[in-house]
Amino acid sequence: MINFKIFFQGLKALKGSKSPAIPLAACFIALGALLKDAGFNLQQSAASSLFTYALPGQLVMAESLLVGASIINIFIAVWLVNFRLYPMTVSLFPLLEHKKQPKWKYFLSCHFLAVTSWLIAKDGYQKIDKKYRIDFWIGIGIGTWTTAILMTVVGYLSADYLNKDMLIGLAIVNPVYFFCMMIGAMKNLSITSAVFGGTILGPLIYTVSSEWALLFAGVIAGTLAFLIGGKNGK
Amino acid sequence: MASSQIIILAIIATSLATFISRFMGAITSKKVSVKSKVFEWFNCVAYATLAALLGRMIVFPAGVLADSDLFIRIVVLIICIIIFMISKKNLVLPTIVSAILLSVLNSI
């Protein structure tokens, strides 16, 4: 069913100098503390990371609840901020595809798709035999997912002991880590232009429409990067 | 403060809104070949959307980060990227430095 040797290779991605465990822990600890602030109990906080497992969406949910937004509004706001997972899945899963692997593996393991796991998988898939790449991905997914859930609980429980400056410090770890990982991934012109374009357009369009900013910035900067890459032969 | 029922509904709504994009992605993936132009386009859009999100998180953050100064956040980010580059792409170092640096700078 699952090639465990490859699975553990994926799981081991949590360790080492590229370790996502520390930044992942930092941002989910901050989230756990925020959810407590928003009136969640311990089980609800853990359930949120278990079922959603996408930090920006969970932040939007907590913030929306604090200002008393309706459930429909929360749904739309989260969908718009987490829509990035769609192009991210489409730019990863074809790389993991193999005819001999059952479809359920792909449809279930897509739940593990989040920024951290995606960046690790994009960085390491080439070293893995094509046939077992999906098992490698499941290993990465289980590792990052369980870390996120456990750390949400830790954050919730330690909320009273963390002061505001410490929480702010924990909250910046997430964007810093992702920026570094993306810079590490800038191996060709199209990805480099996509990263620069997105970074500039994201906040810029946000000043016009906070909800649609990510979608528009992503499609515009991405398409431009695609055209630039195509013209220059990547 | 939101009631328990509202919180549970919010968790369900958030999880569904998130899973839709992942699941649609897994379905679309079955029809996209790695060597196609469509795949390359999706790849560019994925990186650009992610970068847009990160840019927004630094400039217009949600949560506790909003209580820090924009200038300080940008300084911390730039210092950490430099550490990342000179440390042969070590990721643990810049992330630990970022937390300590921002906590300290923000408390002054």
Image (spheres, coloured by chain):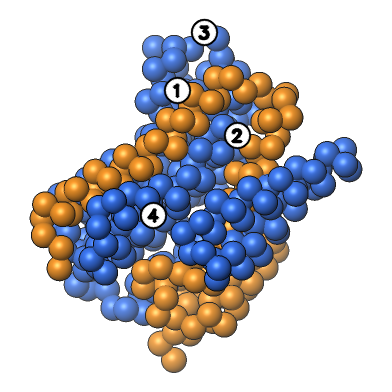
| Quadrant of the drawing holding the N terminus of chain A | top left
Do dots 2 and 3 share one subunit? yes
- Residue in the foreground of this view, choosing between A148 and A203: A203
* Circle 1: element type: helix
Q: Nearer the viewer, mark 2 or mark 3?
A: 2
Is the residue A86 above or below the residue A160 in the image?
A: above
Task: Give the residue type that dot 1 points to.
Answer: Tyr
Would residue B9 be seen by someone viewing this image from the given angle? Answer: yes
Up the image or down, A63 lies above or below A117; here it is below
Near mark 4 (Cα within 10 A), the count class, few <14, some 14-19 or many ≥20, is many
Quadrant of the image occupied by residue A127: top right
Say which residue label 3 marks: A100
- Of tags 4 and 1, the one toward the viewer is 4
The chain that appears blue in the image is: A
Q: Nearer the viewer, mark 4 or mark 3?
A: 4
Question: Alpha carbon of mark 4 to alpha carbon of mark 2: how far?
Answer: 23 Å
Which label belongs to residue A106? Answer: 1
**Amino acid at pointer 3:** Lys
Q: Nearer the viewer, residue B26 or A73?
A: A73
Q: Between disc 1 and disc 3, whose residue precedes? A: 3
Q: Find chain B in the image and tell me its colour.
A: orange
**A57 and A105: which is toward the camera:** A57
Which of the two labelled residues, at mark 4 and mark 3, occupies the earlier sequence position? 4
Q: Disc 2 marks which amino acid?
A: Ser
Q: Closer to the N terminus: mark 4 or mark 1?
A: 4
- What kind of element bears circle 2? loop
Chain bearing tag 2 is: A
Query: Which residue is disc 4 drawn over?
Result: A77
Cα distance, mark 1 to mark 3?
12 Å
